[in-house]
Image (spheres, helix red, strand yellow):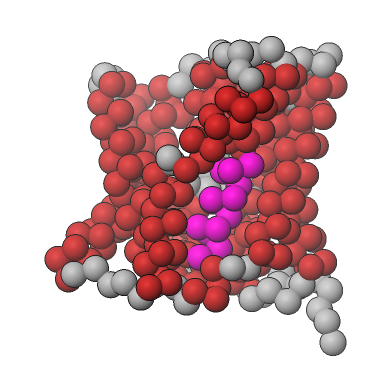
Amino acid sequence: MAQILGLALPFFGLIFLGFVAAKVRKLPVDGLAWMNFFIVYIALPALFFNLISQTPVDKLASWSFILASLLGTYCAFAIAFCIGVFATDGDIPESTIQGLAGAYGNIGYLGPGIAIAALGPEAAVPVALIFCFDNTLHFAMAPLLMSIGGEGPRQTPLQAVLSVLKRIFTHPFIIATIAGVGAAVIGFQPPEPIGKLLDYLSNAAAPCALFAMGITVAVAPRGSLPKVLAALVPIKLIVHPVIVYLLLSWVGDFEPVWVYTSVLLASLPTATNVYVIAQQYQVWVAKASSMVLTSTIASVVTVTLLLYLITTGLLPHDLFPRG
């Protein structure tokens, strides 16, 4: 158990340090913008490119894995969204943010570091695939449902589709993933100085991202905890990974590392991007911040327990083995 704690606590410790630093030193929040720019546009894209470009091409086209993982995320979103509809008497915009809160995990900041540390470099490809397709789902669902609910700018169907495609294909993580796939296909290896620079940036990605996440959680406004969080937090931390695990077992025949990576990413707390989207539409803002904080605190226990089940072999990688 000490080994599991030693694996999990450094990641959550970095979030905690960022949280404490923001509370103790009342520095201008504007400075966080440069940190976030470095993480989102430089360090994490370098990490994704580095890992994917060194991956055999045949592993990058695992569509059954992608669809099973994506369906699990959609199911978690649908459950949380329906609970939101019931709790808000049919308020679609608020229900949309609640749906994201129950399905949109911190797969960008927390995911790569903890998955690769726990499961090894073989986890890099499923991390990147899940990131790309899960984000595509969220980028599409949010504006679509907000438009149905009367929030956001008025757009024709074509404008809405183009807006979603623009968000997807201009996201730096997805650009880096596409570039990494291209490099893997043609066997491109960057010159040694550039390779070393990519290594430096990759090594900086996880620590900077987790520290910045702690700051973001600390400075975000929070209201009173809504009752619906009692349902949304378990959906995100428990129901979501269970659904993903059952679907991957049902489809079957995946490498253990890929299954465990998908389940681990599904178990991560609500992404700070949910708070950003709530701010963008000015819907459920303070409560979205509370959801990020609450799920992050609770995930210290749930994610550590999941890591224990995985590393001790108590969680089989396939519930329904063939043959």
Quarter of the view holding residue 90: top right
The extreme left residue here reads 193
Residue 37 visible to an observer of this rendering = yes
The percent coordinates of residue 195 (x first, y second) are: 22, 66
The percent coordinates of residue 149 (x first, y second) are: 72, 16
Residue at screen point 64% across, 42% down = 137
Q: Main secondary structure of the magenta part?
A: helix
Residue at screen point 59% across, 50% down = 133
The percent coordinates of residue 106 (x first, y second) are: 53, 43
- Quadrant of the snapshot with the C terminus: bottom right
Does the magenta portion include 53?
A: no
In the depicted view, which residue is nearer to us: 180 or 217? 180
Relative vertical location of residue 69 with respect to residue 195 in this rendering, above or below: above
Quarter of the view holding residue 97: top right
* Segment colored magenta: 125-137
Residue at screen point 41% across, 22% down = 219
The percent coordinates of residue 266 (x first, y second) are: 64, 51
